[in-house]
Image: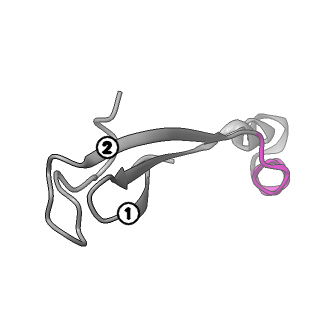
């Protein structure tokens, strides 16, 4: 599931691997802007471009409190 992400194996702030935990996955759904551009460029088929969403993993370090968000490599 997490193979499309580049996530450090340890906290970038304190270099702790023990306290570095994934605390959430956010998904952003339909994008009207992407659908409009796709519709203009490719017609009705381009409207499907609006369904392409973003996924973001949130990591938290229990040692120092650092929080980092990491987005998918693919769009």
Count neighbours of disc 2 (C-alpha within 10 A) and say few if under 14, some if 14 to 19, many if 20 or more. Answer: some
Secondary structure at numbered mark 2 = strand
Whether residues under marks 1 and 2 lie with C-beta atoms below 8 angstroms apart, the answer is no
Task: Looking at the picture, tell me which residue is in the foreground, 5 or 40.
Answer: 5
Residue depicted at 32% across the width and 52% down the height = 62
Q: Horizontal placement of 22 versus 8: left or right?
A: right
The spot of residue 69 in percent (x, y) is 45, 58
From the top left corner, tell me how far across and down residue 38 is, in percent.
76, 50
Mark 1 residue crowding within 10 angstroms, few (<14) / some (14–19) / many (20+): few
**Which numbered marker is on residue 32?**
none
Residue 58 image point, x, y percent: 45, 49
* Residue closer to the observer: 55 or 31: 55
Measured as percent of width and height from the top left, residue 75 is found at 51, 48
Question: In the image, is residue 38 part of the stretch drawn in magenta?
Answer: yes
Quadrant assignment for the N terminus: top left
Q: Nearer the viewer, mark 1 or mark 2?
A: 1
Residue at (77% x, 40% y) in the render: 30
Distance, label 1 to label 2, CA atoms, is: 11 Å
Residue 27 figure quarter: top right
Q: Left of 52 or right of it: where is 10?
A: left
55 over 66 or under it: above or below: above
Farthest residue to the bottom: give it. Answer: 13
What residue did someone put label 2 on? Answer: 21
Element marked by disc 1: loop
Instruction: Say which residue appears at 81% left-offset and 57% top-offset.
Output: 33
Prevailing secondary structure of the magenta residues: helix
Please say if 28 is above or below 12. above
**Colouring style:** one colour
Nearest to N terminus: mark 1 or mark 2? 2
Instruction: Write the start and end of the magenta stretch as one range.
Output: 30-41
Residue at numbered disc 1: 65
């Amino acid at each position: 599931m997490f193979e499309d992400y580049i996530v450090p194996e340890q906290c970038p702030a304190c270099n702790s691997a023990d306290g570095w935990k994934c605390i959430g996955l956010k998904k952003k759904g339909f994008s009207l802007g992407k659908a409009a551009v796709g519709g203009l460029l490719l017609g009705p088929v381009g409207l499907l471009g609006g369904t392409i969403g973003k996924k973001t993993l949130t990591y938290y370090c229990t040692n120092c409190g650092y929080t980092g968000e990491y987005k998918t490599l693919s769009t």
